[in-house]
Amino acid sequence: MPSISFMNVTKRFDKLLALDRLTFDVESGEYVCVLGPTGSGKTTLLRLIAGLLNPDDGTIFFDGRSVNTLEAHDRNAVYVPQQYALFPHLTVLENVAFGPLARNKSEVEAREIASKTLETVKLSWRAQALPGELSGGMQQRVALARGLASGADLLLLDEPLGALDARLRLELRHKLRELVKQSGMTAIHVTHDRDEAMSVADRIMILRAGRILDYGTPSRAYTKPAGIFVANLIGGASFLEGTVDAVTPDFSLIRMRGGLQIRGPSELFASDEPIILGIRREQVRILADKFEAENILEGEIREVRFLGSTREYVIRLTNGDRIVSRRFLEGKNPAFATGQRIYVSFKKRDVMTFAYPSQGLRKELEMV
Amino acid sequence: MQNAKTQTGISRSMLHELLVRAERLSASPFVTKSVYSIALAFFLLIVIAPAIAGILAQLFSLPDLKLSSEVVARMQSAIVWSFLIGLSVSSLDVLAGIPFAWLIVRRREHWTTILDSLADIPFVIPTVALGFSILEFWSTPSGIGMIFGADKVVSPGMLLIMLLHFAFSFPVIVRVMVGEFLNYRETFEVAARTLGASGFTAVRTITLPILRPGILAGFLLALARSLSETGATIVVAGAFENGTVFINNARGAGLTTAIVIASLLLIICSLLVFALTKILAPRIRIAPLRVWPNFEKRLSGRSSIEARNAISLGIFFVFVLLPCLFIALPAIMAMADGTVNEAIAGVGPWAGFWSSMLLSYVLALLATTINVAFGLPVAVLIARNRFGQKATKIIDALVDLPIIVPSLALGVSLSFFWSRLGALPEFWVLVLAHTTITYSYFVRAMTASVQGIAPELEETARTLGAHPLRVFRKITLPLTKYSLLSGAILVFTRSVDETGATSAVSKVMKTAPVLLVDWIRGNVAVTPGERALGIGFLVATSFVALVVLRLIALRQSRRK
Amino acid sequence: MPNLDIVGVSKHYGTIAALDDVTLHVGDREYVCILGPSGCGKTTLIKCVAGIEQPDQGQIFIDGRPMQNALIEDRRIGYVFQDIALFPHLSVKDNLSYALAVRHAPKDRVLTVANEMLDLINMRDRSKSYPRELSGGAQQKVAVGRAIATGSHLFLLDEPLGALDALVRAELRYDLKRLAIDLGLTIIHVTHDQEEALSIADRIVVMKRGKIVEVGKPSEIYLSPKSIFTENFVGETNLLEGRIIETNVSSCVVQLGSHKIELPVSGKVGGQRVVVSIRPEFITLTRRTTEIGGGWAGRIKQAAFLGDIYRYGVQVDGETDMVVHVPSTGETGGFAVGESVNVALGKSGHMLLFNYPVEGLEKETALE
């Protein structure tokens, strides 16, 4: 029995269609990340589950029972907003004990549950502090503890790490998942940071303009993305325009701009079908000299970007298209210099193919 | 011993049981909607309806609308003057109040915080006392005329009314503007300066336009006060008539028709002016940027700033503070010469005085209690849009009605309404009048306070399992308790201060300020000492209120 | 052309030192990123340069001219605020031309510059819109355009991309760098995001608690930082505590738990407590087929697929946890949780040796 089930759920705000016939399941104990640009409807989704909003159409089920008319305080789904909403006039301990007390546990019991939970987030030593005295990372942990201690089944996290420094986010995201998994709660974690989603999710749901574009494991979403937008959102890629020239059982011949021809995977294409090619950055190799390969194209290094453990090279091919290559472990100095003429190579099986988008490539990639 | 212990033990657990039951009850949306509906019904039926219906009913029951042409002329000019005075005084207050509020907020030194408290004084002193003080200051040989060796500087009349209204509306503007400046994101101004704007230019082109809604709100509040005020205006009017003075004179002469028509006209014109201003003013397009860099740079210089501050402080002292505090002198003198003993003994006019004071306080207490009880749900209702956006907008506008409608006209309408409805004792009509007048102040203060709490706090509490009553008790109330207290004190002082509606309603009973108007105008024979002392007593109690308000504000800011 | 000298600047708020003896030179057309956790003083520093705050001690020179008594409006520095701060009552066009209007420039000049800026940020079609109608990214662009319209060549950017989605941020930062190069600007860009700093800065200034920790080129800061704080803050790393057990003329041997490594570092004392840092990408894992055998034995505790890499949590010696990144394009396939592996710490050049910090490792590397 799935813990949460959405059946054709629609939500409107005046004329704006925030969510459009959403249908999906979340299994009990799952950690699901909802990934999407600002305005895609992620927060609305969370608030619908929490009971802070009611759907205009469709039904929401918890454990098979409709909750459309169930009030927020009866839903057993704790909402943790982006700014944490810690009660500023209550101490850390009182904040964490709020949930158990609201569910009519005795004072003594509630405090005990709160103390135990504070131990798991390593904040027992700050139990008597007021939220305003804590750092951002500590506040985040208190907000989490408050959710974990509540005894609810569902944990709804709205950009839980959004208010923190980048480095802190890196540090805390795994601890977040660990603690939630330990508690056994089902979690829905909303974010716009795809690294975060890939690191912590059992499954990732990609939301865009109120619709689900993809819903699957990080690995599946990455290797077989459902569309250009998803491919760009999860992992990024170089996108090039092309037309299918011919298809053989082994490979397909694709003609790019300027007549450059490459080999792609053998798939069911219509002849002369216009398509979009996508190649992941780490699957593009740079070579100083030309040699035999499935695909090899000439180009010039336009930009070199140092990213720490990797370097990215922006290469301009002879036909004017741009392609990006990511190289690992290069060391202090880049292997190739700006302006250098080189060759790029990639395997035909690494070429992702997509139908040509009706509104054009630029609009399709826009982060809205 | 044992019995007592178990008894308190039982009552505590009984209380707990009661709370749990109440909370569970609040979980039903029907119950919460009912609470809001009852509060809303109270507002509409007890506060709004009588205020409007009364005057209308009386209008339709008049045998004829005949007025002598002389009365008509007087009435027309009186009402026009009310608005002319109101609009001009409010504009002057805005011009004088903005630099003053700026000084308080931007120059965070010790003496500016004292200035902040001083600016409140005209606000808290009952307007009757203000009126008398200003009369003494400008129009008597013992006032400021002493410096020039003149009998008086300003005679009772239009100019004196303007000086009076300027003084008591000044703190309204300053309060609003201080709040606006404190909430203002200074980053905008800093951004303007990084783009090359001098201090003056940045304030003129960026800060003030952004704060336009707040300035407008302050302006309208000052206007409302000016149109409403009755007691003090009567004291300083002399032979001049503005709207409220006219109605008061008409009452004295028994010209019912004139009273009804004048009140109705005041109400309609007020509503029109306010509605027009609220709708049109935000639409006025801000003219394209014209800057005179060199000139404005000089205005941003140290010497210009000091000059501006000096002028601002000068205006405050000469036109606001001194005239208001002037009453202190005769009051202190009266304390010294033995009048006090008579006062305490309740001899002569003092018997009536103390019973008036008692009436004032009882009314204030009742009005406060009723307003807190019925106003709180309405405040939450508005702040959290509980009845949907459109309905909330309408209710929000309606809450302003008792402020916009001049209190004298309101009182006239109320007394007509309740006297027609049956034998409602004068005391209860007074209670209703005071409740109606002060309702908006409480609801406005609480609404702003509840809006200041992030909705996420209450939402998260709900998802943690708390029923609505629990959310209110544990989250909303603790975070707004200071505003609740200051709102209640505000209502209390406004009620004690009230003259307009009271004088319209009361036939026999007199509250303290209304009695004091009689004392000042000579309708009751009192010595100057007694007069001064009576006013002094009234002022003293309001001062206590000011101190308490300041302390609350201090605790609140410390908690932050 | 603008260069900047900050000499011995200190600023206190009560007892807290927001800035402590900061000295920095920024050359003409340099793109310098100031990187550090929240509260490290980076924003206070640029506020002092802009004249928004006054330092308690020290001096600031722009092109050799002292800025002591210069008002904000006279310093001619472009400033982009963290909260964007577009004037809400002015249209996009009026916002952009404010700098000129304020100088009483002739009308046609104002118009020309406004249109230039609109073209620069590609927003001609939105010139009449108001800030509240724009997306976060669009607002950010207008804020930058507004600052550029001042004609200054020295720019201070306070977390200019902070309000944006992760993916939009990753794109816009390169546009920012390109703009700086095209217009010949000197830029100081404050951020807490190390990937942002690494990818676009000419030099990175690392700050902590009001002090400059170190300054260097991105590759230096990442691969050979002088301080352990920098090593931990800029990107992820594994910090392994150990002891010196052998010293030679040009090398030493460190005992890390059950493992021994030799490093080409001299000047250490036997028995000295040290910390060895090795980044996740420099560790190699191989399948452990037998219980007995060489290499450092470890067990996979967590496994996550991040797209171009696998992220593993590996535990050695039953208690020490390490993070390892393995490229997904590599030969070694995915490891499963619970699997036994051999941990190889890579070339000695990849490992950095630090003295054990006086204040303790946790305090020294604290992120907030």
Image (spheres, coloured by chain):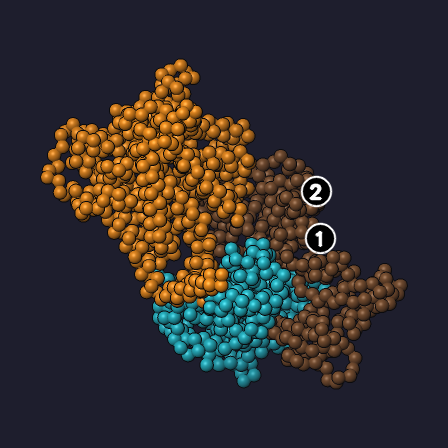
What is the three-letter code of the residue carrying label 2?
Val
Q: Nearer the viewer, residue C11 or B86?
A: B86
Residue tagged 2:
C7
In the image, residue B506 above or below residue A167: above
Residue drawn at (38%, 32%) of the image:
B344
In the image, residue C84 above or below residue C253: above
Residue drawn at (44%, 51%) of the image:
B481
The cyan one among the chains is A
Residue density around tag 2, few if under 14, some if 14–19, many if 20 or more, within 10 Å: some
The orange one among the chains is B
Residue tagged 1:
C213
Residue drawn at (24%, 42%) of the image:
B426
Query: Percent from the top left, x then y, of residue C60?
Result: 66, 40
Alpha carbon separation for disc pair 2 and 1: 16 Å
The answer to whether the residue labelled 2 contacts the one labelled 1, judged by CB atoms less than 8 Å apart, is no
Query: Percent from the top left, x then y, of residue B261?
Result: 18, 37
Q: Quadrant of the N terminus of chain C?
A: top right
Local SS, label 2: strand
Name the side, left or right, on which A163 lies relative to A25.
Answer: right
What is the three-letter code of the residue carrying label 1?
Val
Query: Percent from the top left, x then y, of residue B467?
Result: 41, 64
Quadrant of residue B256 in the image?
top left
Looking at the image, can residue A36 be seen? Answer: no
Query: Percent from the top left, x then y, of residue C289?
Result: 73, 84
The brown one among the chains is C
